[in-house]
Each structure stands twice: as structure tokens, then as C-alpha cells.
Image (cartoon, grey):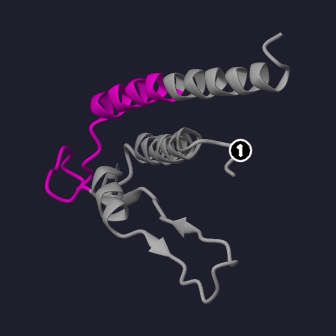
């Protein structure tokens, strides 16, 4: 019996993505004036699609063994090599990074609100609806 639904695991992976995205954005902003620094970005959609297609399932040698499945979903960080904004080889667009940071913060807040709602529902069920 699962105590938590798949929604909790989906929200957990989405929060991992958001945290990684914020870390990458912060690194890009911090290296805005670093010569030859290449901006990084986070790709979650392509990795998520691969993970949906490739789920690891354990082989059971006896019916009494527990069955489990797992899918390792981790956002992929990659360098943006196709653009150049500064003469020193740096390709960080500070305006785009600040915009991405604000968008990511809103996304993070929505995920936290949804997670809090799920925990509130779970707490209500545990207390018997009181």
C-alpha cells in the first residue's frame, strides 16, 4: 500500500528541477563578466520523456517478493554554445537570466502551494476530517 500517491513523487521531481534550474541561473548571473564563460541551462523535458519510456522493473523469482518500479528522473544541465553576447566570449544574457529566475520562482511557489495542499488533505484524513 502506498501512503503517498504519485502526485507527491511528481511534485518532488518538479522541485528537484526547480532547485537545479535556480542553481544554474545563479551561476550564470554570477559569471556574467567572466571571460569565455558559457551560460548553462537545464533540460527536463527530454530527460522526462526518456524516463517515461524506460522504467526499471525488478524481476521477481517468487510471487511473495515485493514488486517495485523506479525511474531515475534528473534534469540535465547543458551549456549554451550557439550564441555570443560579449566580445570576451561570454554568452550570458543577464536580462534573460533575471526573467528565467522570476519565472522559476513563480513555478517553485506554485509547486510548494500544491504540496502544502496535498499535505493538508492528508492531515485532514489522518485526523478523521476534523
- Front residue (pair 14, 6): 6
Does residue 80 appear left or right of residue 125 in this picture?
A: left
Question: Which residue occupies 69% across, 52% down?
Answer: 1
In the rendered structure, does residue 90 fall within the stretch colored magenta? yes
Q: From the image, tell me which residue sits under label 1.
A: 3
Q: Which residue is drawn at 56% across and 24% down?
A: 114
Q: How crowded is mark 1: few (under 14 residues within 10 Å), some or many (20 or more)?
A: few
Q: Is residue 117 left or right of residue 42?
A: right
- x, y (%) of residue 85? 18, 44
**Quarter of image, res 58:** bottom right
Relative vertical location of residue 120 with respect to residue 92 in this rendering, above or below: above
Give the secondary structure at mark 1. Answer: loop
Residue 2 spot, x, y in % from top left: 67, 49
- Is 102 above or below relative to 31? above
Work out which residue is located at the far bottom of the displayed protein and give it: 61
Q: Residue at x 68, y 78 (%)?
A: 65
x, y (%) of residue 41?
33, 50
Does 8 appear above or below 49?
Answer: above
| Rendered view: 22 above or below 83 | above
- Name the residue rendered at 34%, 57% in the picture: 37
Q: Give the range drawn in magenta.
A: 80-108
**For residue 95, side relative to residue 24 (left or right):** left
Measured from the top left, where is residue 59 in percent x and y? 54, 84
Front residue of 12/108: it is 12
Amino acid at each position: 500500500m502506498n501512503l503517498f500517491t504519485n502526485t507527491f513523487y511528481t511534485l518532488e521531481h518538479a522541485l528537484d528541477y526547480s532547485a537545479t534550474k535556480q542553481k544554474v541561473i545563479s551561476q550564470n548571473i554570477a559569471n556574467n563578466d567572466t571571460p569565455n564563460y558559457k551560460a548553462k541551462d537545464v533540460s527536463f523535458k527530454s530527460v522526462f520523456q526518456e524516463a517515461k519510456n524506460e522504467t526499471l522493473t525488478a524481476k521477481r523469482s517468487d510471487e511473495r517478493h515485493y514488486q517495485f518500479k523506479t525511474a531515475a528522473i534528473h534534469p540535465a544541465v547543458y551549456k549554451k554554445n550557439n550564441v555570443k553576447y560579449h566580445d570576451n566570449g561570454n554568452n550570458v544574457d543577464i536580462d534573460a537570466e533575471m526573467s528565467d529566475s522570476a519565472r522559476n520562482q513563480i513555478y517553485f511557489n506554485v509547486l510548494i502551494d500544491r504540496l502544502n495542499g496535498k499535505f493538508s488533505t492528508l492531515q485532514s484524513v489522518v485526523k478523521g476530517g476534523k
